[in-house]
Structures are given as C-alpha cells and as structure tokens.
Amino acid sequence: MYGVTKILGIQGGYRGFYARNTIDLTPKSVNDIHKRGGTILGSSRGGHDTMKIVDSIQYRGINQVYVIGGDGSQRGAGVIFEEVRKRGLKVAVAGIPKTIDNDIPVIDKSFGFDSAVEEAQRAINAAHVEAGSADNGIGLVKLMGRYSGFIAHYATLASRDVDCCLIPESPFYLEGEGGLFKYIEKRLKENGHMVIVVAEGAGQKLIAENMKEMGQDASGNALLLDVGLWLSQKINEHFKKNKTTINLKYIDPTYMIRAIPSNASDNVYCTLLAHSVVHGAMAGYTGFTVGQVNGRHCYIPFYRITEKQNKVSITDRMWARLLSSTNQPSFLSKQDVDDAKVEDERTAKLLDGSPSNPKVEDKVASSNSNGVK
C-alpha cells in the first residue's frame, strides 16, 4: 500500500550489515514463514560495529531500518539511531520486540512469550508423569530466563502440577529450616513425588560460591552456570547422605522451546506489531520501538526500552498467586522483601518520572517527514 519496491533481509544479525549478507524479501518468499520455527535471517552474538553498520546503511541507500529482537538488539538499534541522527541521514530506525524471556520493560509482553509458556507445558507435563510413576519421584525442569523468570512463573501458574518454582528474582537456599531440601522432604512425604521448575538464571550466586565464573559471551552477557545440573547433583547428594532413595528426572527443553513455530496468539500479536511499526516509520517517526502498553499499541523511545530490564516483582500479587498455587516457601527474609520493595519503587519512578536521557528527549521518536522516501 506504500509502494515499496525493494526490501532487504540482513542475515546473521548486526554483523550481516557490513558482511553484506542480504536476501530480497518478497511477499512470496515470506508467505509461510510464520508456520516455521527459528528465523530465515539467522541470528548471532556480538558483531555490533556501529560505524560499519551505518556506513553500510548509507552506502546501500537504505532509508528504513527495522530491528527485530530482545533487549540487546533494541540497545543496538538505539545506538544506530543516534549515529544516523548525528550524520543527518534521512533514515528511520525502528524496533520490534521479540524475546521469549519477556524482559523488555514498558510493554505488556513481547512477541514469543505466549508460545514459550505454552510449549513449556509439555516439558512440565512430562516431568509430572515421570515423577508420578516412581517412588519418591522428582521431576526437575529447567526453563529459559537469564535475568527474568517470567516463563517459569507463568508456566507454573498454567500447569498447576508444579510444587516449586525458582526464578532469578527470588533468592533461595538449600539447607536448614525453610530451605529447599526441607520442602522437598515434606512434599515427598505428603505426595510421594514432586515437580520443580527452575529458570536458567536462578541461584547463580549460590552456585558461584563453590564454582568459578564462566566469563561472558560475544554480546557481553554473563555465561551462566547450569543451575539444572547443579541442583540435580545437590538434591541427589542430600538424599544419598540421608540414606533415602529418590528417582530424579532432569528435563532441559530450552532449545526445543526456542525452535517451535509461534502459536495463534503470537501470530496475531506479531501481525499487529508489524503493521504498527511500518505505519510509524512511514509517518516519519524514528528512534522508537513498537509495543502494546495497557492494551494499546504505542511508539516508545529506545532509551525507555533499554534503561532497565523487565523482571518479576516478588512483592506483587502474581508472585503471591504462584506461592499459593505451589505452597512453596518464599525463601525470603524480611531484608529480601524490603530490598525488593525499594527496587520496585525505584523502577516505578524511573518509568513515570522524567526521561533518563534528556539529550534525546526532544529528538527521539520525533517526526521527520523527509526521512522516509
């Protein structure tokens, strides 16, 4: 409807801009990609060289750039926008939030989250069947969630078969009264089996006390220690020491979840995001991410999206509902709760107060009708 004749797909993430890896995207070539998992463009870690990227945009004569991805990709898009603006190029830069972790702030949810929660049910159900089929059976499922435990949180609420959910935002401990081991003993005595769901970023400080750190990946993210294997080992060691026989089954469906096609809900949401972001760029807006906020589609400045991460609040009602569903202990001291409340208040002020990046306040997401051909 806008008369666009050429659309390029940049392959391999940000590195693809200057490696000149591109494919032509046509209605025919993208006709059924929503029925497939993964990405036809590919992805990568790192490779964000701002100068090379903007040089490539300028050289190719690109006048609209759409960046699809999570918080790291949106940060990269914000840097590209700043450099484009500095050079005075007539280029609109816009972002589409896509991360199953749901860790992008401001927006109601990110594309992919619903599909991930739905697929996680299969792993939890398998763990429940396995645990219930053995004496003192324990099903342990590790789900994605590096810094935000939304997948584990919502999959637990949806399943109703989970006895304990561990996420990065809520610290836990193993030994002593109120600890994880005591709770496992209690549930096995009552039910004869139990299911534990753990997010990949949970318990990292606890693990690091006895193990060396793993460094960082190409994008600068901390390489996490495998909490699933570590927790499995610790649980087995504890019950072996107490001369109690258990049957623990560990399930890691991480990449099975990543690889599935999106469900109907996400397909609809993705279509709406695509329409909204194109209309925004064509109207001359730039420096924004599109997203649903309180049910309405909005254009959000990059700096609002990248200044913090969306995390599970352990002092709100949704986490309280999970605790009442699983009957697990909170594992929290009064100090932990007070610290969480302070963080929630700080976050609320950050989102509701004045922009943290006044340098771009008057420019970001502003109209530039000459910026789009």
Image (spheres, rainbow, N blue to C red):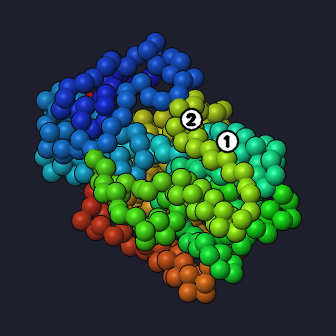
Q: List x then y, in percent, for residue 95.
A: 39, 44
Q: Up-down: is 114 above or below 306?
A: above
Identify which residue is drawn at 53% across, 18% down: 32
Residue 242 visible in the picture: yes
Identify which residue is drawn at 72% across, 45% down: 127
Disc 2 marks which amino acid? Answer: Met
The part of the image, by quadrant, that contains residue 267 is top right
The one nearer the camera, 68 or 151, is 151
The part of the image, by quadrant, that contains residue 112 is top right
Q: Which residue is most to the top?
A: 28
Which mark, by number, is residue 256? 2
Left/right placement of residue 305 relative to residue 261 reads left
**Considering the numbered disc 1 on the image, is that residue within a helix, a strand or a loop?**
helix
Identify which residue is drawn at 58% across, 50% down: 142
The part of the image, by quadrant, that contains residue 239 is bottom right
Determine the CA span between mark 2 and mark 1. Answer: 10 Å
The residue carrying pointer 2 sits among few (fewer than 14), some (14 to 19) or many (20 or more) residues within 10 Å by Cα, namely: few
The residue carrying pointer 1 sits among few (fewer than 14), some (14 to 19) or many (20 or more) residues within 10 Å by Cα, namely: many
**Considering the numbered disc 2 on the image, is that residue within a helix, a strand or a loop?**
helix
Q: Give the position of the C terminus as an image quadrant.
A: top left
Q: Give the position of the N terminus as an image quadrant.
A: top left
Left/right placement of residue 289 relative to residue 231 reads left
Disc 1 marks which amino acid? Answer: Ala
The one nearer the camera, 241 or 100, is 241
Q: Which residue is mark 1?
A: 123
Whether residues under marks 2 and 1 lie with C-beta atoms below 8 angstroms apart, the answer is yes
Q: List x then y, in percent, for residue 92.
A: 29, 40
Identify which residue is drawn at 80% across, 47% down: 134
Q: List x then y, in percent, for residue 208.
A: 42, 67
Residue 161 visible in the picture: no
